[in-house]
Amino acid sequence: MRFDEAYSGKVFIMSREDAEIASTVIYGMPMDWTVSFRPGSRFGPNRIREASIGLEEYSPYLDKHLEEVNYFDAGDIPLPFGNPQRSIDMIEKYITRLLDDGKFPLGLGGEHLVTWPVIKAFQKKYQDIALIHIDAHADLREEYEGEALSHSTPVRKACELLGPENVYSFGIRSGMREEFKYAEESGMHMAKYDVAEPLKKVLPGLAGRKVYVTIDIDVLDPAFAPGTGTAEAGGITSKELLEAIHLIAGSDVEVVGADLVEVAPAYDPTEQTAIAASKFVREMLLGWVK
């Protein structure tokens, strides 16, 4: 699948029709083959798109309008059901093509393992890239029940590829004791429970650097995002996550790509999770795409 092929399904609000001149490509990674609790995040990308129809195209936070960002929604990568390794390979190849064409990739998940091949593609282009990871879970396991390909492993894999000192996690409130010990001893940065305040302290040190940002919707408290596979009580509010997105937008870091993952619509009949996710995507588009 080429990113510029015509897509007949739903698209994110105000998606342009010309892929070639778009600076940004929105794409879906509909995979939930390795989830440890509740499946269904493969349906997240399309629900986020559908929820975007209810958005205003103007952001009062940033005083910007979506007409100011030229983006193309390429639809979902057609991942092979139940095959994690082949899916990962396809995602990496897809992102490599986007980067070769000079696009800003903005991914919609899908389980969090989908971030791993994206990071691999980015590291080949930007060897000094840093990762900002916003999540309830540490995702620092080496394996889950014997499986190295798991949605609980992508940040550990990123640490091993990028160097732990280049990985910055925020909002973490769940994981094995060994994961927190690894974070403490490896040299990575981990901020527990909160996102905005610790982010304020870290961003000046990342000034001038290229950064990839991955957001797991379960960083939000289940009161704000019940529609996710592994909900975790004690999370942040939607307002704090918006603040974090705007802090990154107003900083001197250069965001070169991003994703938002783990929206599982079946567990939220109110659609508040998808509605929140679509608003976060709007703010990411307006704040991070230069």
Image (cartoon, rainbow, N blue to C red):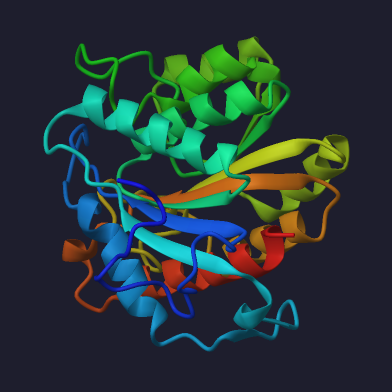
Is 132 on the left or on the right of 106, as rendered?
Answer: right
Q: Quadrant of the N terminus?
A: top left
Residue 32 is situated, as x and y percent measured from the top left of the image, at: 21, 42
Q: Nearer the viewer, residue 169 or 261?
A: 261
Q: Is residue 20 above or below residue 15?
A: above
Residue 247 is situated, as x and y percent measured from the top left of the image, at: 75, 59
Residue at left offset 73%, top offset 23%: 128
Quarter-of-image position of residue 203: top right
Q: Is residue 73 above or below residue 172?
A: below
Q: Is residue 145 above or below residue 241?
A: above
Is 244 on the left or on the right of 89, as rendered?
Answer: right
Residue 275 is situated, as x and y percent measured from the top left of the image, at: 39, 75
Total of numbered circles in the picture?
0
Residue 254 visible from this viewpoint: yes
Residue at left offset 29%, top offset 55%: 228
Q: Nearer the viewer, residue 70 or 28?
A: 70
Q: Quadrant of the C terminus?
A: bottom right
Residue 193 visible from this viewpoint: no
Quarter-of-image position of residue 213: top right
Q: Nearer the viewer, residue 78 or 139?
A: 78
Residue at left offset 23%, top offset 64%: 265
Is 51 on the left or on the right of 216, as rendered?
Answer: left
Residue at the left extreme? 82
